[in-house]
Image (cartoon, rainbow, N blue to C red):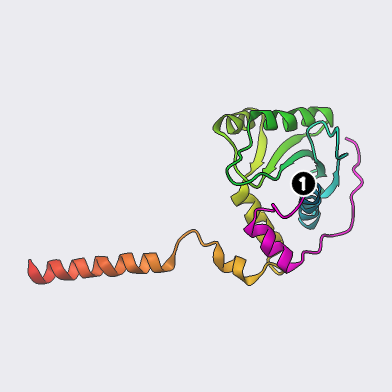
Amino acid sequence: MQAIEADLEVAKIDNEKLKESIETRFQNFDPFEFEEFIKGLFLDMGFEAHTTSSSGDFGADIILEDTKTGEEIAIQVKRYKKGNKVGTADMNQVVGAKSYYGCDKAMMITTSSCTKPAKKLARLTDTEIWEWEELERKIYNTYSDQVPSFYKTATPSWDPWLIFSFLFWIAVLIFYIAVFY
């Protein structure tokens, strides 16, 4: 296994830029800035990481080394708009990069989602996928002390007022049945 030289500079996140980036799914970054951000995210998560060359990267933008297991991971990063999904051609790139770089695993990270055939290919090749929701969760978990307060309150998976309203109308219905029947 080849040693990976890691950039030891830990990413410092500007709250306003992070807020804008989350709101726009990083469309305010150019692709290379986004790759650097993802590399910084992994460095801050305790991995060793380096980016590959910007052209002719053979399907991997970042090579990681898991410092706990020693495994190397080839990562392809796709900064796509919400409706533009990662397809099998994209997934094939990172699967090929895994072999080219001699990595143990492959991973696809996107600001969008993946097509069903791409997900099937990922399952068959044991390629990990982080679609937008997973990426957003990892960003929040890693930078929770720096993440703007709007983000902490803007992402619940349920609406408390909707639940309250639902329970209120159930109580009204029960009362109505009890009184009039």
Q: Is residue 175 left or right of residue 144?
A: left
Looking at the rendering, the stretch of residues picked out in magenta corresponds to 1-30
> What residue is pinned by disc 1?
31
Q: Is residue 82 left or right of residue 53?
A: left
The C terminus - image quarter: bottom left
- In the rendered image, residue 87, in percent from the top left (x then y), is placed at 63, 32
Badge 1 density bin: few <14, some 14–19, many ≥20, Cα 10 Å: some
Q: Does 16 appear above or below 115?
A: below
- In the rendered image, residue 15, in percent from the top left (x then y), is placed at 72, 68
Q: Does 46 appear above or below 16?
A: above
Q: Amino acid at mark 1?
A: Pro
Viewer-nearest residue: 83 or 9:
83
Residue 35: in sight, yes or no? Answer: yes
- In the rendered image, residue 179, in percent from the top left (x then y), is placed at 10, 72
At x 65% / y 58%, what residue is drawn? 22
- In the rendered image, residue 58, in percent from the top left (x then y), is placed at 82, 31
Q: Secondary structure at mark 1?
A: helix
Q: Quadrant of residue 105?
A: top right
Indicate yes or no whether the magenta region holds residue 100.
Answer: no
Q: Is residue 133 left or right of residue 9?
A: left
Residue 141: in sight, yes or no? Answer: no
The N terminus - image quarter: top right
At x 33% / y 68%, what residue is drawn? 165
Indicate yes or no whether the magenta region holds residue 22.
Answer: yes
Q: Main secondary structure of the magenta part?
A: loop
Q: Is residue 146 left or right of residue 163?
A: right
